[in-house]
Image: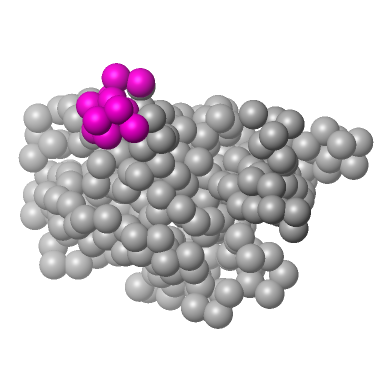
Amino acid sequence: MNTGDKIQFGKYDWRVLKILDGKALILSDSVIIHRAYHPMLTKKEKERKSGGDYRPLWTYITWAECELRDYLNGKFYNKFNEEDRARIAETKITATDNPWSKTNGGDDTTDKIFILSIEEVVEYFGDSGMLANGNPKNSYYIDDEYNSARIAPDKAGKPYSWWLRSPGGSYRDAAYVSNKGSICVYGLVLDNIYADQTGVRPALWLDLSAEQVDRAEGDQAEAPSSCLDGNQADKPSPDLLEDEEIRKAEELKNCAKGQHRWAYFGSDYDTDGNRCNIQVCLVCDEVVMVNKRYHP
């Protein structure tokens, strides 16, 4: 097994990101789960946690507390057979703050299965310098020459966004990789209303002491450019890229007609002192502020 290989483990295809100390860090080769990072708390849960304060406490959720982590280390982990489960190493996961907004990343965890952080995606898929220096054209995204390597399709071959465990611009958000391959550092709201467009690429450290995984049939792919063996970045198929360009062109036409796909990015005060919701179009990145007085 080498860095960059595509292997089969359990029921899924995985990409080998790193090999260290007899273990391999592997990431699902596609988006295999469609799921929110964390659902909103019910009224009962808010009451229990806050003593009657009905502020949206679901926003104060980090990776250590989120429902997605529970799912991956519970129901998803148990989908593997006993032999495979024995090969999934328990790993200390370091919580890091958001590199741009400095939102607190919460507590470190010990997990069998997890999702990547912003820093790990940059490490394994390519570093253009935007993580450290920012993007002069867009303050929300890392949008660079490594986008194509980060695009991940679902089972149907459609490019899907995928969650990262890093917090977004606030506790109500989590970072993600968009279906165009850009890294949205400021993230989406945790229970993303566009959950049908956001999915999960699980990651895990696989014990290689009794290696019994197979290279995916017919796979000749090379490693991402930042993987340890220095191979060229893995590219989506030409057909996938062509379909994505067609879809993007159609969505941009809708944006030009005012038919945007808005996502909630937080709230702030406008120049008149009105409290407003901040909305960002997932297609064209247009940002608007909506007055809460007229849009409760």
Q: What stretch is highlighted in magenta?
A: 43-53
Picture residue at 13% right of the left edge, 36% below the top: 85
Q: From the top left corner, tell me how far across and down residue 105 is, in percent.
A: 32, 58
Q: From the top left corner, tell me how far across and down residue 215 is, in percent.
A: 33, 47
Q: Quadrant of residue 46?
A: top left
Quarter of the image that includes the N terminus: bottom left
**Residue 280 in sight:** no
Q: Furthest-right residue in view?
A: 257
Quarter of the image that includes the C terminus: top right
Q: From the top left corner, tell me how far across and down residue 169 is, in percent.
A: 49, 56
Picture residue at 56% right of the left edge, 39% below the top: 160
Q: From the top left corner, tell me how far across and down residue 42 is, in percent.
A: 35, 22
Pick the front one: 48 or 154 = 48
In the image, residue 196 above or below residue 152: above
Q: In this view, does 211 lie to the left or right of 267?
A: left
Q: Tell me, yes or no, whether the highlighted magenta stretch contains residue 52.
A: yes
Overall secondary structure of the magenta section: helix
In the image, residue 44 above or below residue 292: above
In the image, residue 136 above or below residue 170: below
